Image (cartoon, rainbow, N blue to C red):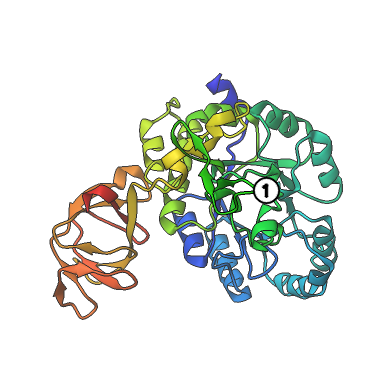
Amino acid sequence: MIEQTKKKYRKPELVSPAGSLDKLKTAIEYGADAVYAGGKDFNLRNSAANFSLDEIGSAVEYVHERGKKLYITLNIFAHNCHINKAEQYMKELGEHDVDAFIVSDPGVMSLVKEIIPGANIHISTQANCTNTKAADFWYSQGAKRVVLARELSLNEVADVSNNSQCATEVFVQGAMCLSYSGRCYLSSYMANRGANLGDCAQSCRWKYSLVEEERPNEYYPIVEDGEFASVMSSRDLCMIQHIPELISAGADAWKIEGRMKSQYYVATVTRVYREAIDMFFGDRTYEYQDRWLEELGKISNRGYNTGFFLGSPGLDGQRVGEESGYTQDYKFVGLIGKPKDEKLIEVVVKNSFSVGENIEVMGRNSCQDFVQNIKEIYNKHMEPVQKANPGQSFFIIPEKPVEEYFILRRKVDSH
């Protein structure tokens, strides 16, 4: 079956998140075929750093020099008050050679077609495309790709991918939303922050208690198996254990969620899926590697399941009890920068580390990983120090060869 699949399907494009220019570069360095990013306006991740117009220009240059692609999100559901500003913004965006624009709103789509003729348009998962007719409709309107709704099974993904002229994309890793394809109004109602305008307060992740109308100051915990229940906080999606099934479904592109996540998250997830895809389509026989899931366990997550791909997640779809928040067993310690000389290498520090600690070094490929005991740390004046503090650059002597964008990490309970 695997050999037949290799012959039948082309390798899917791996699309990684880029919440900032640094994260974009990290995604490309760790194997993304394309990245998706938002400008300062009109995207559904207002809280990410996002990109100025100048940064979008720099990003286009960076990815194209490496034979990769950049997709810009314009996926809010616009109100009339947004239109004039959106028109001007799109005129400025049109000056950059962006590979595609990701939209949800038909009105926004029409503006892109009008203002940037010939632009490639992808339909966001927010448009909740769940069937072949819908994919064909978007194709007839000029869309080149549709990001399918996350509520589809693998069989449904295959049906749409095999029977529509429109290319398809599916999310394979990252946070899931309680609401149908992210079309949520809970945040607007509870926090006056519009999820469909990019300002979700993640109200579904909050902790809730029960209050009886006649007893306004008496709060009763919602319990399940003796613990607090976060009844609306979904587990994260992870399909790394089902690569052959995903390939067989025939989607043209696989997408990783996470524009709000760290460079460490982007690097780790991109590296794992890159390796899995390349192994499947490589010369050797594909074999699932336990280390892939272990690696994905080293990034912050809410516990994993397979979403709707293998059927409704049911009770397994929610984080409950004491586990309702994030699990974070590893900390992102730093990012390897440029060499100072033949021995010293720069570390851009994200979390402090000290002389005497054992730190894991993570390379672009798993074969480059190693553990190092930190014997010396130098500050920017080349003075020896005992501790490297976050937000600054320090220098260490690596025990094995390292390259720019390699990552330092530390198991949380080892510090």
User: Residue 237's x, y, as percent?
Assistant: 54, 39
| Residue 82 appears left or right of 413 | right
Q: Quadrant of the C terminus?
A: bottom left
| Residue 374 appears left or right of 109 | left
User: Which residue is most to the top?
Assistant: 1
Instruction: Answer above or below: position of 142 versus 93.
Output: above
Residue 156 sits in which quadrant? top right
| Residue 195 in view (yes/no) | no
Q: Residues within 10 Å of mark 1 (few under 14, many from 20)?
A: some
What residue appears at the point 54 percent right and 57 percent down from the top-left corner? Answer: 259
Instruction: Answer above or below: position of 369 versus 42.
Output: above
User: Which residue is most to the front?
Assistant: 214
Q: Quadrant of the N terminus?
A: top right
User: Residue 265's x, y, as percent?
Assistant: 44, 52
Taking depth in this image into account, of 110 and 41 the one nearest to the observer is 41
| Residue 372 in view (yes/no) | yes
User: Residue 145's x, y, as percent?
Assistant: 73, 46
What residue appears at the point 65 percent right and 48 percent down from the top-left corner? Answer: 213
| Residue 200 appears left or right of 23 | right
Residue 307 sits in which quadrant? top right
User: Residue 278's x, y, as percent?
Assistant: 48, 37
Taking depth in this image into account, of 216 and 33 the one nearest to the observer is 216
Residue type, numbered disc 1: Gly
What residue appears at the point 21 percent right and 81 percent down from the top-left corner? Answer: 381
User: Is label 1 in a helix, a strand or a loop?
Assistant: helix
Instruction: Answer above or below: position of 405 versus 135.
Output: below
Instruction: Answer above or below: position of 158 versus 201.
Output: above
Q: How many marks?
A: 1
What residue appears at the point 37 percent right and 48 percent down from the top-left corner? Answer: 328
**Which residue in the structure is indicated by mark 1?**
182
| Residue 382 appears left or right of 231 | left
